[in-house]
Image: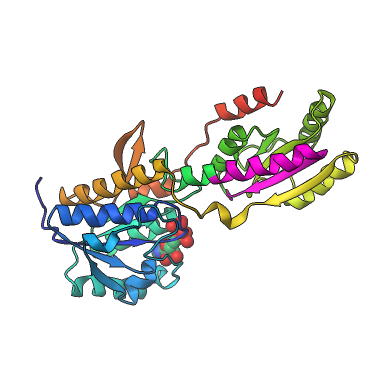
């Protein structure tokens, strides 16, 4: 493999944390050592780059992290990186350590910062998608998404136990401000009655009608999965209270799953994905390519420009809506 003068790379995690980020860090570090290049760990995302929290890390420095949720490198939201002065400090710190390239594990915000950084300083940047929302164009799966799906399905299964013991109708809010991937997949996986997502507004009257039809057909309890960004009601509580007024014999409950969706041990799928992406990211930089994001498509690793990853929208699989409608009969 031709090495285009890349001798030292740095890796950081940025934005929202996601299970599997540690497996990606481990893969980047170990692939660097394997290729005889030095790897530097940056702590606290772009903030750590600006504050010079950058340390050389060896293969042993990433022992026993493949199974851990969150990110051992820590993450941060960093306003200072949005200013040219902040980015200049970051660049000077990298230059002082003779670091040649930067791998960013994060979401589209982090990639936007990375893209600007590369164009400003002609500094090679490579992105690895890590976000439970899976809302990044250029990869069928982002690191953390599969784990989050399993966490949510597990939680809804538990809610179902209590729902069927009473005549309860549960509204379960899951993450997804802009994208319904988590709601749609976990709704099907957990056998929800209805799935409400930002991409499709079914309207409150149709929701009510559907729940009434289910009741007529003999269902005594139901689960509705609602993505955070759904617009059917002002929020999940307002939606639930509207339905309760119109279906008074049901006991309507709301469960907001919240941040537990981000945590936990990464699934095997996420560990393998992160391992593959980490190695591929290092190999890509060594080939002299940058300003790209690694992704996966039909089990093949692919590359796309960071610009496309940031600008294009990852679409939901609309066929899942049809499947859900059929199966909630
Ligand atoms: P995510 O990467 O998960 O989408 P954020 O949107 O919070 O998370 O972005 C993470 C960080 O990326 C921000 O805190 C900021 O430091 C950096 N960033 C985001 N947008 C920009 C931008 N337009 N210019 C420079 N840096 C940015």
Image quadrant where one finds the C terminus: top right
| x and y, in percent, of residue 53 in the image | 31, 74
Residue at figure coordinates x 62%, y 43% from the top left: 198
Residue 46 figure quarter: bottom left
Q: State the residue in front, 212 or 110.
A: 212
Question: Looking at the rendering, which quadrant does residue 113 occupy?
Answer: bottom left
In this picture, residue 165 sits left or right of residue 112? right
Q: Which segment did they paint magenta?
A: 151-177
Q: Residue 5 magenta-drawn?
A: no
Question: Residue at coordinates 60% horizontally, 25% vertically from top-left?
Answer: 323
Residue lying at 15% horizontally and 52% vertically, measured from the top left: 34
Ligand 1 found in image quarter: bottom left
Q: Nearer the viewer, residue 197 or 256?
A: 256
* For residue 236, side relative to residue 100 (left or right): right
Residue 32 picture location, percent across and down: 19, 55
Q: Quadrant of residue 208?
A: top right
In this view, 74 is above or below 165: below
Residue pictured at 19% horizontal, 75% vertical: 96
Kindly tell me whether residue 245 is visible in this rendering. Answer: yes
């Amino acid at each position: 493999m031709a090495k285009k003068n890349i001798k030292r790379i740095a890796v950081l995690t940025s934005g929202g944390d996601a299970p599997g980020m540690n497996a990606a860090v481990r893969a980047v570090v170990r692939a660097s050592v394997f290729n005889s290049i030095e790897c530097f760990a940056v702590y606290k995302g772009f903030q750590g780059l600006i504050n010079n929290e950058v340390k050389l890390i060896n293969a042993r420095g990433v022992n026993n992290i493949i199974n851990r949720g969150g990110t051992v490198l820590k993450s941060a939201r960093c306003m200072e990186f949005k200013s040219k002065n902040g980015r200049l400090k970051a660049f000077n710190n990298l230059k002082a350590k003779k670091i040649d390239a930067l791998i960013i594990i994060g979401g589209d915000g982090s990639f936007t910062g990375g893209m600007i950084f590369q164009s400003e300083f002609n500094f090679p940047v490579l992105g690895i998608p890590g976000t439970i929302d899976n809302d990044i164009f250029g990869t069928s799966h982002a690191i953390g998404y599969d784990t989050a799906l399993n966490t949510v399905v597990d939680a809804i299964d538990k809610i179902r136990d209590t729902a069927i013991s009473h005549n309860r109708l549960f509204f379960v809010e899951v993450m997804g401000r802009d994208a319904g991937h988590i709601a749609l997949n976990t709704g099907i996986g957990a056998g929800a009655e209805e799935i409400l997502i930002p991409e499709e507004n079914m309207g409150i009257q149709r929701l009510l009608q559907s729940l009434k039809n289910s009741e007529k057909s003999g269902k005594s309890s139901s689960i509705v999965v609602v993505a955070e960004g759904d617009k059917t009601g002002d929020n999940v509580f307002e939606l639930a209270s509207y339905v309760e007024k119109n279906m008074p014999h049901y006991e309507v409950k709301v469960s907001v799953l919240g941040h537990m969706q981000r945590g936990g041990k990464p699934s095997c799928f996420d560990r393998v994905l992160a391992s593959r992406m980490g190695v591929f990211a290092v190999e890509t930089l060594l080939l002299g390519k940058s300003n790209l994001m690694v992704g996966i498509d039909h089990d093949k690793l692919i590359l796309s420009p960071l610009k496309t990853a940031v600008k294009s929208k990852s679409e939901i699989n609309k066929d899942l809506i049809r499947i859900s409608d059929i199966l909630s009969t």
